[in-house]
Image: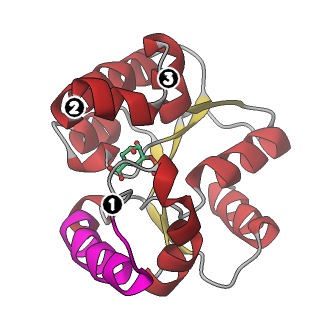
Amino acid sequence: MIINKKIVFLGYMGSGKSAIAKLISKKLDLINVDLDNYIEKKENKSIRNIFKISGDLYFRKIENKYLKDLLNSDNNKIISLGGGTPCYSDNIELIIESKCIIFYLRANVDTLADRLFNERDKRPLISRIKSKKDLKTFISKHLFERNQFYLKSNFIIDVDKKTENEITNECISLLS
Ligand code: S3P
């Protein structure tokens, strides 16, 4: 299969963007770049430390800058975004204008809360939430705000109760 465009994965934290992008890149023999990893390498700091030391506004500024780097780069590649990337600055417009194929990995609140609860420490936006009930309330509100951006994707893939292999095959079948 020959893909002449960049492929972008977006969705909430814990929706599986990085994992699925990695699997598809292997199957299609495409370069895979995870925007969070790219930012960490360029800034020589973890995402957690960037938030802690420089704050969220700084993070959103460099996220926009490094997203542009990737969208303007030559090679066709698979890019997995951070959960907030499409929702800030002109990012979603930039992605659409770049004629990327955009997949939204859509997970429901229960799936996300189950996956994220024990990983809160690593994630600055939810690190202070104490109980699963509060996490669910937070995710519900946050998803409601973010969905308007996520829904601009070309393809929406429901990921609840599916294996990584099933999701990967579903995405690849939509590319052919
Ligand atoms: C964020 C999601 C994170 C990371 C940052 C902010 C968000 O990426 O970019 O902590 O605003 O949802 P993942 O979705 O890969 O965890």
Question: What residue is disc 3 on?
Answer: 40
Three-letter amino acid code at disc 3?
Glu
The mark total stands at 3
Can the viewer see residue 54 in this picture? Answer: yes
Front in this rendered view, residue 135 or 144: 135
- Determine which of the numbered discs, if any, sits on residue 58 in the image: none
Between the C-alphas of marks 2 and 1, the distance is 15 Å
Q: Are marks 3 and 2 in contact (CB under 8 Å)?
A: no
Residue 91 shown left or right of residue 121 in the figure: left
Q: Position of residue 124 (x, y in %)?
A: 36, 48
Q: Residue at x 29, y 22 (%)?
A: 62
- In the depicted structure, whether residue 76 falls above or below residue 121: above
| Label 3 residue SS | helix
Q: Find out if the beta carbon at label 1 lies less than 8 Å from the nearest ligand 1 atom.
A: no
Q: Residue at x 61, y 47 (%)?
A: 18
Q: Nearer the viewer, mark 3 or mark 2?
A: 2
- In the depicted structure, whether residue 108 falls above or below residue 19: below
Can the viewer see residue 107 in this picture? Answer: no
Residue 22 shown left or right of residue 118 in the figure: right
Between the C-alphas of marks 1 and 3, the distance is 22 Å
Mark earlier in primary sequence (1, 3)? 3
Question: What residue is disc 2 on?
Answer: 55
Q: Position of residue 51 (x, y in %)?
A: 31, 34
- In the depicted structure, whether residue 158 falls above or below residue 156: below
Between the C-alphas of marks 3 and 2, the distance is 15 Å
Front in this rendered view, residue 77 or 57: 57
Q: Residue at x 37, y 20 (%)?
A: 66
Q: Residue at x 57, y 66 (%)?
A: 118
Write down the region rendered in magenta. 129-146
| Label 2 residue SS | loop
| Label 1 residue SS | loop
- Determine which of the numbered discs, if any, sits on residue 128 in the image: 1
